[in-house]
């Protein structure tokens, strides 16, 4: 007996494959048509799928499409990581209703995982450069019924977004080619091209309300690059670093792409820095015992430093 999630995936995959054969286009393009037809009521899966069933089924279909066209810069955020970020957002953010932004929303998987995790408490905004990905993300948001406004643009250009309570983002890593725009940032490189991931951190802080929290998936070597000291002084000025977590290398195909999680709080009068920054190593997520030790480390730190 197949699960509802599997049935929903087969429903999506069968329609997408049929459209792909008829129109001879890429799987992801056909997937977009499938989601449009589904939203228009032209096709309908079996009843009973939850928001998480739909998100996971769409995620599997996107992964299938991405295998066909390797898009190294558009890697979807893995589920395990999305759930961990969801757990952290729930722990830190105490507001009953909050606004959340992902300035590099991609397929929407990370943002939707977090929004489903805190279902009913978040209203979202997502920014993305890639036209196909943002259309997929927008259709996924509508099918899953999460309230998200999407902006198709370069997130490092001025954004017409009011300050948000929370930012989550799996940051694009590398150099940012638009040197003129980079020149408007405090974190521009003194010489040569600036790091996009540094500029994303600055832009995100700019669009966060005072006291708001930011959860970034960052390269593991964030604080070891040539521009790290500049990033450090910038963060000291504008934010309180809450936590730096190292993610298990097994999550990434190539250990050179290993990542971590950086948690920040934007400064606000009366809000103090934690007594100590939570430095943690996330264990292999398939080992429940190690994970439960990790969660008690995090909650212990939270009680000592945030309550
Ligand atoms: N969390 C996303 C998901 O679950 O699909 C994946 C994010 S992926 C690691 C980074 C995304 O940033 C890519 O989709 C890429 O197209 C986007 N991106 C890169 N530079 C950008 C820019 N300047 N403005 C907006 N989006 C950008």
Image (cartoon, rainbow, N blue to C red):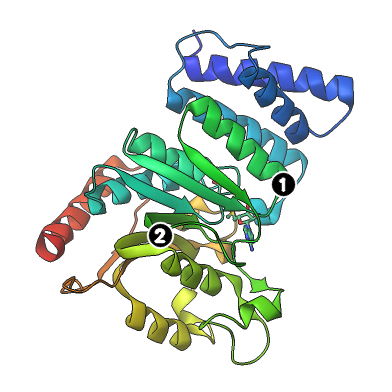
Q: Residue furthest bottom?
A: 191
Establish if 52 lies above or below 265: above
Secondary structure of the residue carrying tag 2 is loop
- The residue at 31%/38% (across/down) is 121
Establish if 195 lies above or below 23: below
Q: Position of residue 197 (x, y in %)?
A: 55, 69
Establish if 178 lies above or below 30: below
User: Can the viewer see residue 245?
Assistant: no
Q: Quadrant of the C terminus?
A: bottom left
Q: Position of residue 85 (x, y in %)?
A: 37, 50
Closer to the camera in the image, 286 or 133: 133
State if disc 1 and disc 2 touch (CB < 8 Å).
no
Residue to which mark 1 is pinned: 131
Q: State left or right for residue 26 relative to residue 184.
A: right
In the drawing, what numbered circle is on residue 229?
A: none
Q: Quadrant of residue 136?
A: top right
* Ligand 1 location (quadrant): bottom right
Establish whether ligand 1 lies closer than 8 Å to the Cβ of label 1: no
Number of marks in the rendered image: 2
Check disc 1: other Cα within 10 Å, few if <14, some if 14-19, many if 20+: few
Residue to which mark 2 is pinned: 163
Establish if 20 lies above or below 101: above
- The residue at 35%/77% (across/down) is 238
- The residue at 57%/32% (across/down) is 140
Q: Position of residue 146 (x, y in %)?
A: 45, 33
Q: State left or right for residue 41 relative to residue 202.
A: right
Instruction: Give the Cα distance between marks 2 and 1.
Output: 24 Å
Check disc 2: other Cα within 10 Å, few if <14, some if 14-19, many if 20+: some
User: Can the viewer see residue 275?
Assistant: yes
- The residue at 38%/78% (across/down) is 235
Closer to the camera in the image, 87 or 204: 204
Secondary structure of the residue carrying tag 1 is helix
């Amino acid at each position: 007996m197949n699960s509802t999630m599997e049935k929903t995936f087969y429903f999506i995959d069968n329609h997408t494959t049929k459209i792909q054969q008829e129109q001879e286009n890429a799987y992801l393009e056909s997937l977009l048509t499938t989601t449009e037809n589904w939203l228009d009521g032209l096709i309908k899966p079996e009843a009973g799928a939850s928001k998480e069933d739909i998100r996971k089924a769409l995620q599997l279909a996107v992964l299938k499409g991405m295998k066909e066209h390797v898009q190294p810069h558009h890697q979807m955020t893995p589920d395990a990581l999305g759930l961990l970020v969801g757990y952290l957002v729930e722990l830190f953010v105490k507001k009953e209703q909050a606004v959340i932004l992902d300035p590099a929303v991609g397929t929407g998987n990370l943002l939707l995982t977090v929004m489903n995790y805190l279902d009913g408490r978040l209203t979202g905004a997502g920014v993305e450069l890639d036209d196909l990905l943002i259309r997929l993300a927008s259709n996924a948001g509508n099918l899953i019924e999460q309230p998200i406004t999407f902006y198709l643009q370069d997130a490092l250009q001025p954004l017409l977004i009011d300050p948000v309570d929370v930012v989550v983002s799996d940051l694009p890593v590398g150099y940012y080619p638009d040197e003129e725009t980079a020149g408007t940032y405090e974190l521009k490189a003194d010489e040569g091209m600036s790091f996009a991931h540094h500029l994303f951190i600055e832009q995100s802080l700019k669009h966060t309300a005072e006291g708001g929290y930011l959860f970034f998936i960052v390269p593991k070597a964030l604080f070891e690059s040539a521009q790290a000291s500049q990033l450090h002084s910038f963060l000291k000025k504008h934010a309180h670093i809450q936590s730096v977590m190292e993610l298990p290398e097994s999550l990434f195909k190539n250990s050179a792409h290993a990542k971590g999680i950086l948690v920040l709080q934007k400064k606000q009068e009366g809000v103090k820095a934690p007594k100590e920054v939570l430095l943690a190593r996330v264990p292999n997520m398939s080992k429940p015992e190690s994970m439960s030790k990790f969660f008690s480390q995090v909650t212990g730190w939270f009680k000592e430093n945030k309550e």
